[in-house]
Image (tube, rainbow, N blue to C red):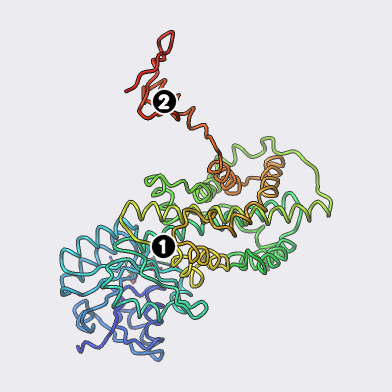
């Protein structure tokens, strides 16, 4: 077989097939391979006219079809399947060749694989690919990690197939080894928070303001014309205005209210705990999904006393709707700020140099959290690349200052009326925690010293101290 293909894709389920088509539609010759050959055959039969495909029946044929240095992209299930495929192909490759994992791998696996393949002279690029099957075909956001050398070879190709916003491609070299998969993981964590916050806004408008799903859809459509303009707000309006054909009821009322939490959202929270990154809104969004699935527990709580309050007048409902918009926006800024800080913490931990402005830029298109808002974040980093927090940016700080009273009102109303707003309130508490002069962590340190002699530091002198709590005069000792 002649080596004519600039890239090869193995694993031709929805994602791999669509990515392969995307490469081919952009003029690349694409070698295609799948464990079960029927998928390869089907791809070429159905879509062969879209570009130049080289169908490979075996691993050897697949590798032989690739130009050197070879670029071989894996689109299979994360975990053992990815390891199996790497082990199948790595022995057939030569130093300088590149294996790209476009699946949803855990970044720690990517780090491990990169290290081991580097020792064998191969480049391993963990590339986060966002945007689902439609994104894969029409233009995803691509978040590649790996070596700068591999990006020099792959970058132009990713730039070609990725989504474009204002003519700019939604891809960039995120950082070395697992940085790309890490950033993709945080993207998904933020996506969880975004979706939960929107859900809480809907629930408040329905339960407190007494609005119908169709009326709320209209509110979301209006919000989508302002600073909340985003793909998720847009599809929320579509889902809320959809009526179930079988029953004539709002679609949202006939869908079971239990949501799953798959790999990446959970990984974000687990990793955040390990890094000590307080991603509270993301965590609450993940736990909210977990709570929704606790059928027996919900049965035990159902019917317990709830909130107090009366129906709102139309004027009050309108005022409340404006408060919810402010609460949603402010909480969203906090959720993103938490995600951004988590990326910074990881960059410190793993020695990555990550350009956070570039991350905002490549999430403006081709991914689920794409939003006008991300351009604001990009601009904030363009003004100050060293921003510690989005709230250090004057524009965001002014918006939060403006939102904070209605945000509190919305959360207070939710508590009084017994409507759960775990992500809104987590975001507000995060804001209050971080802006506080003093935190009760001082008391926590006192308690720890009392029961475990864990020692404490003082605000007025250097050193570590322990109080002899058992003694009558509770002498303080320096330790
Ligand atoms: N679906 C999405 O919206 C989405 C979005 C972003 C990222 N991703 C990620 O992209 C990757 C691909 O997703 P997908 O939904 O297209 O497919 P998938 O269902 O995750 O994986 C199916 C593919 O993996 C292959 N495979 C599984 N085990 C294998 C093994 N041991 N050896 C060789 N091949 C094996 C299958 O081959 P056979 O045909 O022979 O079974 C098939 O081609 C996953 O990592 C996924 O998490 C998916």
Q: Residue at x 47, y 79 (%)?
A: 138
Determine the residue positioned at 19% across, 74% down.
Answer: 96
The x and y percentages for residue 350 are 31, 54
The secondary element bearing badge 1 is classed as: helix
| Residue 73 visible within the image | yes
* Residue 246 showing in the rendered view: no
- In the rendered image, which quarter is residue 244 located in? bottom right
Find residue 448 and name its label: 2
| Whole-number angstrom distance, CA of label 2 to CA of label 1 | 37 Å
- Picture quarter containing residue 50? bottom left
Q: Position of residue 293 (x, y in %)?
A: 53, 48
How would you rate the neighbour count of disc 2 (Cα within 10 Å): few for under 14, some for 14-19, many for 20 or more?
Answer: some
Judging depth in this view, the residue of 239 and 268 nearest the camera is 268
Vertical placement of residue 210 versus 123, above or below: above
Query: Which quarter of the image is occupied by the N terminus?
Result: bottom left
Would residue 223 appear left or right of 441 to someone viewing this image? right
Q: Nearer the viewer, residue 94 or 466?
A: 466
475 w.r.t. 121: above or below: above
Q: Residue 225 appears at what percent x and percent y?
A: 67, 69
- Toward the viewer: 430 or 400? 400
**Where's the C terminus, which quadrant?**
top left
Image location (x, y in percent) of residue 366: 48, 72
Q: Secondary structure at mark 2?
A: helix
Choose the circle earlier in sequence order: 2 or 1: 1
Q: Quadrant of residue 34?
A: bottom left
Q: Which residue is mark 1?
A: 184
């Amino acid at each position: 077989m002649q080596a004519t293909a600039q890239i090869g894709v193995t694993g031709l389920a929805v994602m791999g097939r669509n990515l392969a088509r995307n490469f081919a539609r952009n003029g690349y010759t694409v070698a295609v391979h799948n464990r079960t050959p029927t998928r390869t055959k089907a791809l070429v039969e159905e879509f062969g006219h879209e570009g130049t495909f080289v169908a490979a029946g075996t691993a050897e044929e697949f590798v032989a079809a690739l130009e050197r240095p070879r670029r071989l992209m894996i689109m299979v299930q994360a975990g053992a399947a990815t390891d199996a495929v790497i082990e199948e192909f790595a022995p057939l490759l030569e130093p300088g060749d590149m294996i790209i994992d476009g699946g949803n791998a855990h970044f720690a696996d990517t780090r491990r694989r990169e290290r081991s393949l580097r020792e064998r002279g191969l480049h391993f690029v963990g590339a986060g690919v966002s945007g689902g099957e439609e994104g894969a075909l029409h233009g995803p956001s691509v978040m590649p990690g790996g070596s700068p050398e591999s990006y020099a070879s792959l970058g132009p190709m990713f730039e070609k197939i990725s989504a474009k916003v204002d003519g700019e491609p939604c891809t960039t070299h995120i950082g070395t080894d697992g940085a790309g998969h890490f950033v993709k993981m945080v993207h998904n964590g933020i996506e969880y928070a975004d979706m939960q916050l929107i859900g809480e806004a809907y629930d408040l408008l329905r339960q407190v303001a007494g609005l119908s799903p169709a009326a709320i859809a209209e509110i979301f459509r209006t919000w989508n014309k302002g600073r909340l303009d985003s793909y998720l707000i847009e599809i929320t309006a579509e889902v809320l205005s959809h009526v179930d054909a079988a029953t004539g009821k709002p679609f949202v009322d006939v869908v079971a209210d239990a949501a799953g939490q798959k790999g990446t959202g959970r990984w974000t929270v687990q990793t955040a705990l390990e890094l000590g990154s307080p991603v509270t809104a993301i965590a609450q969004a993940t736990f909210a999904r977990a709570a929704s699935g606790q059928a027996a527990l919900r049965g035990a709580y159902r019917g317990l006393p709830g909130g107090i309050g009366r129906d709102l007048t139309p004027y009050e409902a309108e005022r409340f709707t404006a408060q919810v918009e402010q609460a949603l926006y402010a909480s969203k800024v906090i959720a993103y700020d938490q995600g951004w800080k988590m990326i910074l913490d990881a960059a410190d931990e793993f020695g990555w140099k990550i350009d956070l402005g570039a991350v905002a830029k490549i999430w403006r298109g081709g991914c689920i959290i794409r939003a006008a808002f991300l351009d604001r974040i990009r601009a904030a980093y363009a003004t100050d690349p060293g921003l510690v927090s989005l709230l250090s940016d004057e524009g965001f700080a002014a918006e939060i200052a403006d939102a904070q009273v209605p945000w509190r009102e919305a959360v207070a109303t939710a508590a009084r009326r017994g409507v759960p707003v775990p992500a809104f309130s987590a975001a507000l508490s995060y804001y209050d925690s971080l802006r506080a002069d003093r935190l009760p962590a001082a008391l926590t340190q006192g308690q720890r010293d009392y029961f475990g002699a864990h020692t404490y530091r003082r605000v007025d002198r250097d050193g570590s101290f322990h109080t002899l709590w058992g003694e009558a005069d509770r002498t303080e000792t320096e330790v």
